[in-house]
Image (tube, rainbow, N blue to C red):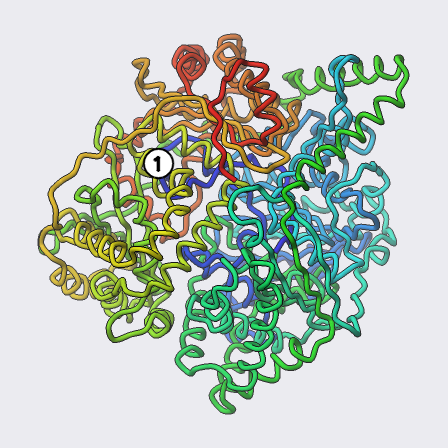
Amino acid sequence: MLRTVSCSTSLTSSSPFFPRSYSSTGALRGPGRNLRRISSPSSTGRRGLRVLSDAGRSLNRKLSRLSVRAVATQPAPSYPDVGKDEAEKLGFEKVSEEFISECKSKATLFKHKKTGCEVMSVSNEDENKVFGIVLRTPPKDSTGIPHILEHSVLCGSRKYPLKEPFVELLKGSLHTFLNAFTYPDRTCYPVASTNTKDFYNLVDVYLDAVFFPKCVDDVHTFQQEGWHYELNDPSEDISYKGVVFNEMKGVYSQPDNILGRIAQQANIPMLKFIPITLVINEDFHRKYYHPSNARIWFYGDDDPVQRLRILSEYLDMFEASPSRDGSKIVPQKLFSEPIRIVEKYPAGRDGDLKKKNMVYINWLLSEKPLDLETQLALGFLDHLMLGTPASPLRKLLLESGLGEALVSSGMSDELLQPQFSVGMKGVSEDNVQKVEELIMSTLKKLAEEGFDSDAVEASMNTIEFSLRENNTGSFPRGLSLMLQSIAKWIYDMDPFEPLKYTEPLKALKARIAEEGSKAVFSPLIEQFILNNSHRVTIEMQPDPEKASQEEAEEKSILEKVKAGMTEEDLAELARATEELRLKQETPDPPEALRCVPSLNLSDIPKEPTYVPTEVGDINGVKVLKHDLFTNDIVYAEVVFDMSSLKHELLPLVPLFCQSLVEMGTKDLTFVQLNQLIGRKTGGISVYPLTSSVSGKDEPCSKIIVRGKSMAGRAEDLFNLMNCLLQEVQFTDQQRFKQFQSSFLISMQNRLRGSGHGVAAARMDAMLNVAGWMSEQMGGLSYLEFLRTLEKKVNEDWEGISSSLEEIRRSLLARNGCIVNMTADGKSLTNIEKSVEKFLNLLPETPSGGLVTWDGRLPLRNEAIVIPTQVNYVGKAGNIYSTGYELDGSAYVISKHISTTWLWDRVRVSGGAYGGFCDFDSHSGVFSFLSYRDPNLLKTLDIYDGTGDFLRGLDVDQETLTKAIIGTIGDVDSYQLPDAKGYSSLMRHLLGVTDEERQRRREEILTTSLKDFKDFAEAIDVVRDKGVAVAVASAEDIDVANNARSNFFEVKKAL
Ligand SMILES: [Zn+2]
């Protein structure tokens, strides 16, 4: 659900369908595609359980937030303390202090005496330090002001009076996290870094931005970030421009997001969260961005006294304000009657429109905040009902055939009052009511009959495992804890409580053991769901006219605006447009840039981080071992080669992987198998991976089986992997149909929500073989394949089933297999036997001979039509084809292009939410991409100007240093132990040696202006010989093809 709609300022980047590129895992790779995702709390807290770590993360968030008061049982280690007098001297009063054993931290709550600002200071051994400032920002109207302000305050401040200090930090710091989010009732500004000096630099820029932004006196900033009329010439039409405007247009081009918004507003009408209408209100800042209304979080291994020193400098400048009382969130009264809402959403014309309804039931669970034990039990119930494919509510809905997929369902407790939602999309008109009935009858049945004891055990193990693992992926742990704590703290409740789960979990386990799970869960279903009259049912109907209607409406408003203007007004607007554009495109003066604090090159380690790797051999199979502290968990990957797979089977591979983990064996139903995995392990997943390999024609094409378990259960883990790989039977036609339809739906969503990823995949498929393979398994070609597959499943299931068997036979073999393991040394030794047994059970060689992968899509400019209000525009070419040889400077240069040229032109003056470039050093493909972009040809022209931009570039040493440091920050991105082991495997597969990493690092560190100029020649190949692919609206494509005679081949997709 769209609890957190905005995530400000992130350079958006695509999430390639399969990890074709590896920057997020830290292999040698430049800045780009998946470095900075849109990272919003909701996206990490959502239910998308295909990737292991996501499952863990969402659970973790959920559960750690749901906990009751507990007494610390462990003595606190001696973390540096802030004495009472010391705190007093700095203007703070110590409110309370606790050692929190769950996160091995000492947490102290301070209050700034003068303003009442509260500060949580968390000390521990985590080098990934986190700072966050959170303001309560209840929306009083529907203007989207909190969101526009969230963007605007990062556009220059008192001490940092440049256009966007935020972007300077993106360019030139070692941040491990840098972003901002707007929730329906609060705004968060978090930063993180492992380098202390860098960390304090980030903190200072953020504090100054929040408390002293320039935007309050500068209407240009609101116009740029929010919205404004644009008129280039009085003879042309007026249009809307603005970053948030296009960001939100993109968000609400996705039906799921529209549904989420309607649900949110219907459930809690007082928390309006409407896409921006057009009002600007500077007063909002004065009122809510005040220390009295702020909560500040510090976390990590830095000096807690220094934290207070930094804060007092800012906070002492303010007097107390009543804003804290004025921002109190009032609970929504529960409805006495259920309500029903019917709305239309913009749909494409493909497929059967009758089958595109959505239905969604939501409950607001309680008027008062729940006690933490109840919340914990509800979180558990949520996992039991919906958490895995075997969970009864999820399973029954999907098996009913009434709809194609679930919409975002489950408990949500980020706001004051918890909610529960469940629903389906892809529902035919006649079935809407049946879905509602099935949901209600299933809930009733679960309340009456309770849950299977294996299911309860599996949920319990999964929950305990994820709490112990605390795997937040690339999201800093300290930030995850902050978001948990703030979910109570923001409502004036105890900020410590959500961090302590041990005791309440113990109590819940004891209750289940004594009274049975039914006695615990059935009353919850009855009280909070079945007998709760605050139920909002939403039905959404597809409307193929709606997108063009909305566009026409916008056009007519703008025409009226224009008609109401005199000639002088129009001339003035054109002048103002030009003035804004000039301002946006004029670089900051060097003295302004200099004031943003930055590190020196001497602060940067000269060597890359090495992952301990021992390469061994078991039975002729290569085994990589990484001896790292993992809190007694074993992470394992088994890699199989795809080089004996027949070409035509490629698009079936994702479905093959899904079938392995969700189909069942001769002896076990898929539910039993799934519960067994839940009870014994931390999860197993299977997915394909393809990439070009530098200097080789043959791509790397693998299937990866990834799993984790407690060290003591490693044998079970490998037994279960073996069971999935060798014993699962491809006989369940109904389940396969479900996979097909849910994959089809998620591909359609990708096209709407991550069209830049689809465009990138398409261009890659034209430019290299690995890209072609990847596109067959996750791009537009795959979408087309899934559409034809439905018929085939009905008519020739036997044929599909035997194709799946054939894929298995062509993959499974000891030959070409690689095993990768990450754990502490002792565990690594202990699990060898299990690995050996697993390997011995594999066939020696794959069936079928070696195949040669050589597929490509024809080179051509393509426009992919979807119903959308904003476009995704890409252009790419292979720079190695010019004879360019890889040099580490390429990473610095492409990052610089993204954060300056593309940021300024595509985002700031173009009005797109994002514009960036990506260089795949393995293939040589350099691509430009835009995201939620109101333009099309104009963006392509900007891309084509990149070579000239580089040739005309004049950077001083400081700018260059910043660019270098920022690049090192990307290359050295912070990783938890499992990610370190995984990165090392990726480097091994792609032939990237530690020597090469060292050499590239030296090249990065010595990048010169000459490198930039030289790179211009290489990058011209994209302009001259590159291919362009846009995912765009029919209207914009028509306009483009008229303006530039049939530039694009048009392909209809949705
Ligand atoms: Zn935003």
**Residue 155 appears anywhere in the view:** yes
Residue 11 in picture, x, y percent from top left: 56, 34
Amino acid under label 1?
A: Pro
The answer to whether 984 is drawn above or below residue 404 in the figure is: above
Residue 490 in picture, x, y percent from top left: 72, 59
- For disc 1, the neighbor class at 10 Å (few under 14, some 14 to 19, many from 20) is some
In the image, 277 versus 380, the foreground residue is 277
Dividing the picture into quadrants, the one containing residue 236 is top right
Dividing the picture into quadrants, the one containing residue 240 is top right
Q: In this view, does 602 lie to the left or right of 277?
A: left
Which SS class for mark 1?
loop
**Residue 171 appears anywhere in the view:** no
Q: Residue at x 79, y 13 (%)?
A: 234
Quarter of the render that holds ligand 1: top right
The answer to whether 754 is drawn above or below residue 880 in the figure is: below
Residue 8 in picture, x, y percent from top left: 64, 40
Q: Is residue 144 left or right of residue 826?
A: right
Mark 1 CB lies closer than 8 A to ligand 1: no
Q: Residue at x 44, y 25 (%)?
A: 927
Q: Is residue 882 left or right of residue 31?
A: left
Q: Which residue is drawn at 32% across and 73% down?
A: 669
**Circle 1 residue:** 608
Q: Residue furthest bottom?
A: 514
Quadrant (top left, top right, bottom left, bottom right) of the N terminus = bottom right
In the image, 887 versus 548, the foreground residue is 548
